[in-house]
Amino acid sequence: METQQYDQLYQLYTEFDTQPLREYQDFVDLFPPLDSRVALTHWQEASNELERKKTDIAEMFTDGETLAEIAARADRDAAFTAIDLYNKYGRSVNALILDVDETLRSAGGTDNEIPRETLHVLTEFHDAGMPIIICTGQTLENVKGFMIQGLGNEIVHSGNLSIVYEAGTGVFTPGHGSDTKQLLYESLDPAVRDVFDEIRGRVLPDAPSSLRRGCHLQGNEFNVTLKPNFETGSDRAEAVIDEGLLYLLDLLADAVCDAPERHEWARSYYAAVDPEIKSVLESKECLPTVAITEIPDAVISLFDRIDVAYYHADAAEISSRELNKVAGVEAALSVLGITDPFVTVMGDSKSDLRVMQWASEQNTGLAAAPSHASEGVLSHVRETDELVFDRGKSADMLRIIYVLNLLAAIQ
């Protein structure tokens, strides 16, 4: 079967000029609704030509209808990437795990909106019964808003779409009764929750004026996230987020203990576990000299359970290590009833990398990333299946997965 599929794909892309087919498919799929007889006539003519070209392919091959659908969605390179993935893993993807910012959408190329072609491919996946898990650091209300706007209320509330929000502190899966909204942070020990309560109560009132003017607190249910009031990635955003990181480290230290050395302990601990945090501290000439071995065990035990994340010129955040995107994804898969997952994880940041590593270690999926993703993410993706896509082109990668599943359906 493997040789037959390769031979059929080779013949398909050798004997047919498939580019016009894809152009017709894109036009038919993405044609905007217009109240114009001329426009509708043009759309119908394109639709008829699309079906004619698909019929020509379908009549040439044993699995012609499937091959026609593949040719309408993927060029030669994408199709052979898909068949290589299928023959490597031997199964289809049964859930999508998708980051949003700088993955599905990219401010650098799509005006910070999810492109229409990406939304259309997601709709096709949904129509084929594919569960979709949106996995993001954003608040639930933000994600619900733009997903309903992009995909429609029916899909978002279909029971086959789940939202892991605030990087795993909660999971929202409409249509599942008492499991519709799971507040995972409620399972944390009181000692950890008390730390977050104290930080949240102080973070804005105690902030220096430069921080109060230059950033804002994201409206999270649990995590404490500082976001810049300047364009993400700009020099001003970098400066305020670097300052915000130092401020959050000190607040965390204050909430954990009252020892005179507490600020040095926090900076030493988190510099040791995160090279990016260490780099910021070095640039500010405030890297502590105290060794981690000098930090009391009781303080270490709390630091071990609390994560401080730095996203260059984008955000500084305090969250729970016990509540990350992996925990949220596992909860979402459970609610969706996916007991034997083989997923595609698409993301760009260190929080997405954890999900990718989980999928790799558990042999439960593959990973893809945009070319501007963090170096750690790109290293992982290149070392596994090299599924790197261009900025703003998430639809291209999604189509590869769509084709993989079409190939898997051929008996």
Image (tube, grey):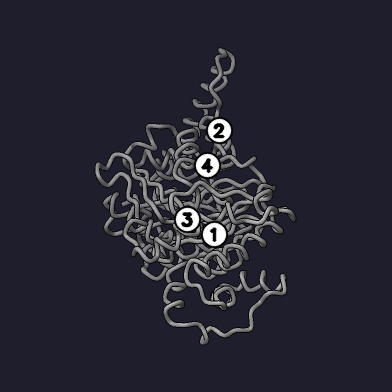
Q: Secondary structure at mark 1?
A: strand
Q: Please name the residue shown 53% across and 63% down the image.
A: 350
Residue 17, image x, y percentages = 58, 42
Left/right placement of residue 244 relative to residue 387 reads right
**Alpha-carbon neighbours of circle 1 within 10 Å: few (<14), some, or many (≥20)?**
many
- In this orientation, which residue lies closer to the viewer: 273 or 20? 273
Depth check, mark 2 against mark 1: the one in front is: 1
Foreground label between 4 and 2: 4
Q: Would you name the residue on which mark 1 appears? A: 317
Residues under labels 2 and 1: Cα distance? 45 Å
Q: Where is mark 3, residue-wise?
A: 223
Question: Mark 4 belongs to which amino acid?
Answer: Thr
User: In the depicted view, which residue is nearer to us: 307 or 371?
Assistant: 307
How far apart, in angstroms, are the residues tagged by discs 4 and 2?
17 Å
Q: Nearer the viewer, mark 4 or mark 1?
A: 1
Q: Position of residue 319 (x, y in %)?
A: 47, 61
The circle on residue 118 is 4
In the orientation shown, which residue stands out farthest toward the right?
A: 235
Using the numbered discs, state the Cα–Cα distance from disc 2 to disc 3 in whole angstroms.
Answer: 46 Å
Whether pointer 4 and pointer 2 mark residues with C-beta atoms closer than 8 Å, the reply is no
Q: Amino acid at mark 3?
A: Asn
The residue at which mark 2 appears reads as 24
Q: Earlier in the sequence, mark 3 or mark 4?
A: 4
Q: Residue at x 34, y 50 (%)?
A: 409
Residue type at mark 1 is Glu
Does the CB distance between marks 2 and 1 fall below 8 Å? Answer: no
Labels 4 and 1 touching (C-beta < 8 A): no
Q: CA–CA distance between discs 3 and 1? A: 7 Å
